Amino acid sequence: MLCLSIRTVHADSLAVRDLNPLLSGYELPPSLSSALNPVYRNDIQVSYAISNTSLEQQSSNEHLVVDGELHRWQFTATHAINSHWNVSIELPYQSISGGTLDRFIEHFHNDFNLPNGNRANWPVNRLLINYARNGQTLYHLENSQSGIGDMTLRAGWQFDAQIVHTATVWFSAKVPTGNANKLTGSGAVDAAVSLAAQQQVNNDLQTYEQMSLSWLGNGTRMQQEQKHSVWSAMAGIDWRLFNTMDVVAQLNAHSAIFDSELRLLGQAMQFSVGPRYHAQQWAASFFITEDIAVDTAPDVQFQFTLEHHF
């Protein structure tokens, strides 16, 4: 997925997702490319992401505990049909458990002077997710789960392909191949439309942004609280350090999927930063994501992505 720009190789935006376990399966589009590949027709991407959450929240009539670790593997294949159209398919495999990173996260937050919430008072590497409203438990999980997630199909139409700026509209449809009770899917068909754009500031600096609107079907997890339209947005900067190495910083946000007063079920904002290596046909990135709006998303996420263009 290279850019029509004065740069030989383009570093795409970071494919950040909000890996809050209770949002699993809902179609919030990740960062999508604004440019079709002018050299290669196909792109295969494999990513591995971990999120770790340890939060307890309460409102006047709600109580939520999320203490667990989510692992997400995803395979994405993209094909450029012609100079204007791209199609892609995403298939994830996801697991939720107590994990192994609780102590590491505590030290990580302490080293960077970040809040640790309830971590010091809770069992290490425990899985417990419980949501109650008006004293009635609406979702409870304490046993590890794993499985194929919801599959997403996308089609992108590039309508702007200038040297210094590009823009593409993406149409997405997600089908419920996962399991809502196991937190690998939502149990419904979702759809979304996204506008992705990027600008060339100079030979070493690019900016990019994306706006999306999602329509969510009737999911089978916390059904009465679920909303049916959600917006999401992203903006970032890509700075080239060397010919084969960039640093990317990105801000992601989305509106609430659930009708709730709790921060973890409401609007969320995350900040991601990390390096990206790119060769002629290969690219790799590693980035860290933090909940810049504290307690609205997982405490921390780590993701590694490997791409091959051909």
Image: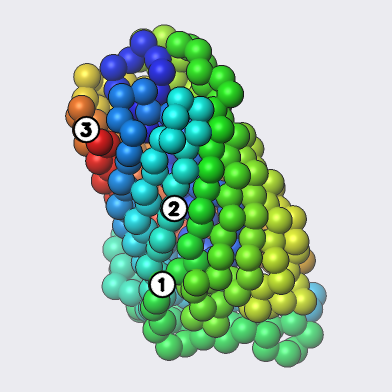
Q: Which one is earlier in the sequence, the residue at label 2 or at label 3?
A: 2
Q: Which one is earlier in the sequence, the residue at label 1 or at label 3?
A: 1
Q: Amino acid at mark 2?
A: Ile
Instruction: Classify residue 257 as left or right of residue 119.
Output: right
Label 3, residues with CA under 10 Å away: few <14, some 14-19, many ≥20: some
In the image, 172 versus 61, the foreground residue is 172
Question: How far is the residue under mark 1 from the one under mark 3?
Answer: 29 Å
In the image, 248 versus 95, the foreground residue is 95
Q: Secondary structure at mark 1?
A: strand
- Name the residue that disc number 3 marks: 281
**Image point (74%, 82%), residue name:** 133
Label 2, residues with CA under 10 Å away: few <14, some 14-19, many ≥20: some
In this view, the mark in front (2 or 3) = 2
Image coords of residue 90 (percent x, y): 43, 55
Q: Amino acid at mark 3?
A: Gln
Q: Quadrant of residue 239?
A: top left
- Name the residue that disc number 2 marks: 89
In the image, 298 versus 2, the foreground residue is 2
Q: Quadrant of residue 263?
A: bottom right
Q: Secondary structure at mark 3?
A: loop
The answer to whether marks 2 and 1 mark residues whose Cβ atoms lie closer than 8 Å is no
Image coords of residue 27 (percent x, y): 59, 57
Instruction: Classify residue 27 as left or right of residue 74.
Output: right
Image coords of residue 307 (percent x, y): 28, 42
State the mark number for residue 199. none
- Name the residue that disc number 1 marks: 148
**Image point (33%, 15%), residue name:** 7
In the image, 70 versus 125, the foreground residue is 70
Question: How far is the residue under mark 2 from the one under mark 1?
Answer: 14 Å
Image coords of residue 95 (percent x, y): 38, 73
In this view, the mark in front (2 or 1) = 2
Q: Quadrant of residue 75?
A: bottom left
